[in-house]
Image: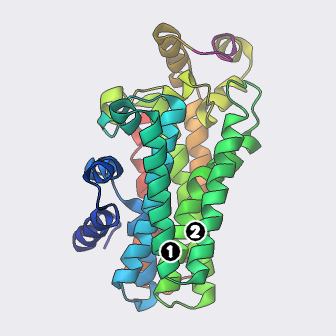
Amino acid sequence: MTLASMDDDRGRIETAMLAAVQTPDPYLTEIASHLVVAGGKRLRPVVAIAAARVGGGQVTDDVVRGGVSCELVHLGSLYHDDVIDESDTRRGVETVNAKWGNLQAILAGDFLLSKASEIAASLGTEVAGLLARTIGWLCQGEVEQLRHTYDTARSEDSYLSSINGKTACLYGTAARIGAIVAGLDRPTVDTLTEWGNAFGMVFQIVDDILDITDTTEQLGKPAGHDLVEGVYTLPVLRTLAMGGSVGDELASLLGRPLDIAERDKALAIVRANEGVESAAATARQYVAAAEEACDDLPPGAATDALRAAPGVLLESAQPAF
């Protein structure tokens, strides 16, 4: 068993995802389901299901729906992010804001958050409260990122705090919801939450590495988009911290919006130096933390899958460093 090989569960996830965004209004349904239909790895529901399986827990429909609630929060945040970033493509298709406009995208994102909250409420007050807190953490992470837009002096603490809020905590919540709904004991619930948070940190650092190293075609969205938007992620911060001619040249380009030529030059500088490998080394620390959490979980196929997943995720970016 691996997180990538759960085909039967993925079918259940897709069915539940599509059911969650059906409304009596075909227009709203089309907008709300736009990124659902576009596809995706559905990692948050997969994590919830894998967590439920630890120690022999059962994957009920409620476990699947709990994972789907986390994925809907993620999708709702993407709708809002694309408005903020004025993005035109996402997952290889037009963004909702590009196709229908900003107002529709914002309201559809709100609708997805409301559906996530509705599902969570049906699973009990603890799950409802947890998801509500997680949405708050996500907003805090986004605000931390926004307040340092175009800030070449942004600290690594700011970056790590931001990605913990905007990405990692949602994986921790997915794992926790899966464990809670499956009725696992509290020490296991807490350990799975730790694993999810560490996995989420790996996920975002890898995503930030790929934004530097991959092409637009590989990403399904514009390469170097974070640089253009003034979001300076770990590979960029580590390159800036090198100082000397490399750091100075990069700093001279940043701190303001970039045109295509400036973006390509900045990307070339980061790719040619140690920032990417240095960021990968930090991701390895979170891989180790996730693996260590698995030492405290009951042995079995689900635990083995959770232990392997962060390393496999980091290896997916290996050609870049």
Disc 2 and disc 1: Cα gap in Å?
Answer: 7 Å
Q: Picture coordinates of residue 33 (x, y %)?
A: 31, 52
User: Which of pointers 2 and 1 lies earlier in the amino acid sequence?
Assistant: 1
Q: Disc 1 marks which amino acid?
A: Ala
Which quarter of the figure is the N terminus placed in?
Answer: bottom left
- Residue at image position (51%, 10%) is 259
> Magenta stretch: residue 216 in it?
no
Question: What segment is highlighted magenta in the picture?
Answer: 251-257
Q: Nearer the viewer, residue 93 or 236?
A: 93
- Residue at image position (27%, 47%) is 38
Q: How many marks?
A: 2
Q: Picture coordinates of residue 267 (x, y %)?
A: 51, 20
Residue 288 visible, this angle: no
Q: Which mark is residue 120?
A: 1
- Element type where label 1 sits in the image: helix
Q: Disc 2 marks which amino acid?
A: Leu
Circle 2 residue: 131
- Residue at image position (26%, 72%) is 12
Q: Picture coordinates of residue 136 (x, y %)?
A: 66, 58
Q: Picture coordinates of residue 115 (x, y %)?
A: 44, 64
Q: What colour scheme has been applied to the protein in the rendered image?
A: rainbow
Circle 2 packing at 10 Å, graded few (<14), some (14-19), many (20+), is many
- Element type where label 2 sits in the image: helix
- Residue at image position (71%, 13%) is 248
